[in-house]
Amino acid sequence: MPAFLRLGVNVDHIATLRQARGTPYPDPVEGALLAAAAGADSITIHLREDRRHIQDHDLFRLLPVCPVPVNLEMAVTPAMVEIGVEARPKYICLVPERREERTTEGGLDVAGNLAAVTEACQRLAAAGSEVSLFIAADAEQLAAAKASGAPNLEIHTGGYADAEPGPAREAELARITAFAREARALGFNVHAGHGLNTENVAPIARIPEIVELNIGHALIARAVFVGLPAAIAELRLAMARSSV
Ligand code: PXP
């Protein structure tokens, strides 16, 4: 594990629980402050177009009080780019979005939407945010990402996380490892996330080119039982196990 491997805590699913009843609690902003106090290096929120969990007011309440950088995940649409430009979080991660999906199922098709992605990257960077593209470990997407001018990449680890432990997972790991090396050689800061948990995180944390992991669902699910600080500590320990 690189000594500086950062953990970004995604607090979307605190808002999922709140939205289930329409109450003011549990508040993802309070969760973000707790996570930061428990050692999160950044806080990630995904403002989805259907607003199923995080709401606009969460973003604008979080930004002025969060003691660590905020990473806003959003789709590449004119309306979302306007919000990103207005909010100016430290980091923005552009992700694909389909309304009917349960979660972000694939990587962003940068190659198929290069003009729109490049324009979004330029506008968001001009407003002051550092942009990342959430992509699958795919050579065509990597070349397009380079052309877009984005400085950061987040590798979609969902395929790795869903694969059965054994040869299938090893193959996914090998693909991600090689891709991370190529992306770093092209100058990207390389992040990874999706589906990671205490059981599967160590091999990903061991990839030296990856400097940041973004983890949400499994962490919040565990926090329901043991609390957010303990769940973060367990995850940190699992990440650190990669280096012993
Ligand atoms: N990174 C990105 C870009 C995502 O869209 C998500 C899911 O919102 C995550 C990381 C975190 O995935 P998970 O909730 O499965 O940990």
Image (tube, rainbow, N blue to C red):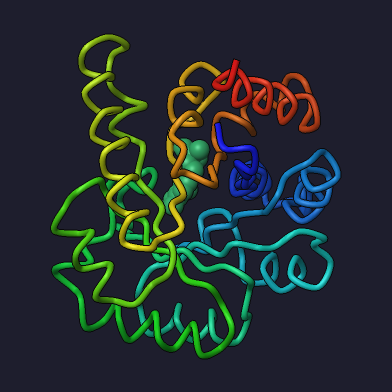
- x, y percentage for residue 108? 28, 59
> Within the image, what quadrant is residue 217 found in?
top right
Judging depth in this view, the residue of 215 and 203 nearest the camera is 203
Eyeballing the image, is 15 above or below 226? Answer: below
Residue at figure coordinates x 63%, y 80% from the top left: 87
> Within the image, what quadrant is residue 241 found in?
top right
Q: In this view, does 194 lie to the left or right of 71?
A: left
- x, y percentage for residue 17? 64, 41
- x, y percentage for residue 214? 54, 44
Q: Is residue 81 left or right of residue 157?
A: right
Residue at figure coordinates x 35%, y 73% from the top left: 76
**Quadrant for the C terminus in the image:** top right
Residue at figure coordinates x 43%, y 39% from the top left: 194
Judging depth in this view, the residue of 52 and 213 nearest the camera is 213
- x, y percentage for residue 207? 43, 34
Residue at figure coordinates x 78%, y 24% from the top left: 230
Eyeballing the image, is 133 above or below 27? Answer: below
